[in-house]
Structure formats: C-alpha cells, structure tokens
Amino acid sequence: MRNTILVGPMGAGKSTIGRMLAKELRLPFKDSDKEIEQRTGANIPWIFDVEGEVGFREREHAALAALCQCEGLVLATGGGAVLREDNRELLRAGGRVIYLRTSVEQQLERTARDRNRPLLRGVDPRGVLSSLMEVRDPLYRSVADIVVETDERPPRLVVTEILDRL
Ligand code: S3P
C-alpha cells in the first residue's frame, strides 16, 4: 500500500493532521523530524546549533530516504523537505503527496509560541516565513498530487477533505 505524505510549511498542521489521518486510515504515523531526532539522539535545535543547516539537511535526506521506502505510512515531513531535488524525487516516488497550503498569517499564529524551530529564532518571523514561502510554494506544488487549503479550517475538516480526495 502506498504511503500518504504530507508536505507544507512550518505551522501548516502536518503533524496534527497526519496523526488524525493515520488514525482514520488505521495506518502508522511517522514524522520525519522525530525520525531525525531519534536517529541522531538529539533534538532539531541542537542539530542546527552543532552541525548547521547543512548537517541537518543531510540527516533529513537520510531519514526521508528510509521512510519513503516503507509502505502504508502516513508521513509528515519538515517544511524544508522539498528543497533538494533528490528529496523531491523520493517524495514523488514514495507515495501520494498532499500539500497543506497555509498563509503566512496562519503560520505566524500557529508558530508564535514555538521555540523548537531554529529558522525562526531571533529573526523577524513574518519576513522569514514570507521569503521561505516564495521559494518553497512552487516546490510543494511540484511534488503534490493534492493541494488542500488549511487556512481558517479546523484540522477535522482538513482531514475529511483529504479522505474524500484520496
Ligand atoms: C524546517 C521545518 C521544521 C524542521 C526544521 C526546518 C524548515 O519542520 O524540519 O526546523 O526548513 O522549514 P516543521 O515544518 O515540522 O516545523
């Protein structure tokens, strides 16, 4: 059975929606960031501090390569998973890809109290999220089989739409 893979930016709700979707589909749920942390034995901010973004992206690629080989998973990916062409190929080949589209406004609301995202530490989050979105939105679209709107919609509704369209 094919994997169901969620892509989208920070604060799109990939983990929340992924967990709910997995429950509905009675499939195991995996989160690539959690997989990276387990494999490394350290959390994401530590990896960014010690190994830099370059080190993190290498670890992310290895985790995605392993997870995309599995079958029948619901997989939530990190917001930057689509940056590398080799990752985009892994995602496309790895299963049905769903892009959880989200506005920068909504991302700001959902990430406001979160200290676990190194790319938002000590910066103007609106500026950073907007420029990331400009680069990444076309990349999310380039791997997606389905694009689902998440703005101002409770996760339950998003999950129902995904189930209808799978
Ligand atoms: C990142 C998003 C994070 C995490 C890391 C880098 C990004 O995942 O992978 O901090 O580049 O957008 P979430 O999208 O789950 O926050």
Image (cartoon, rainbow, N blue to C red):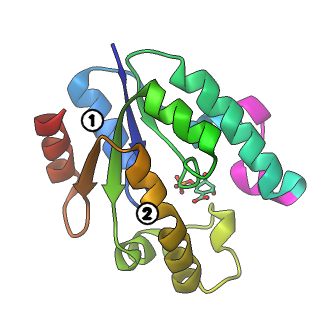
Residue at 34% in and 66% down:
102
Q: Is mark 2 within 8 Å of ligand 1?
A: no
| Numbered label attached to residue 5 | none
Front residue of 31 and 91: 91
| Residue 137 tag number | 2
- The picture places residue 64, in percent across and down from the top left corner, at 60, 32
Q: Residue at x 68, y 74 (%)?
A: 121
The residue shown at (54%, 18%) is 69
91 over 51 or under it: above or below: above
Residues drawn in magenta: 38-49
Badge 2 local density, few (<14 within 10 Å), some, or many (20+)? some
Residue 162 position within the rendered picture, expressed as x and y whole percent measured from the top left: 19, 41
- Left or right of 49: which side holds 166? left
Residue for badge 1 = 21
| Marks 2/1: CA–CA distance | 23 Å
Q: Secondary structure at mark 2?
A: helix
Asked if the residue at tag 1 contacts the one at tag 2, i.e. Cβ–Cβ closer than 8 Å, the answer is no
- Label 2 amino acid? Asp
Residue 28 percent coordinates (x, y): 39, 22
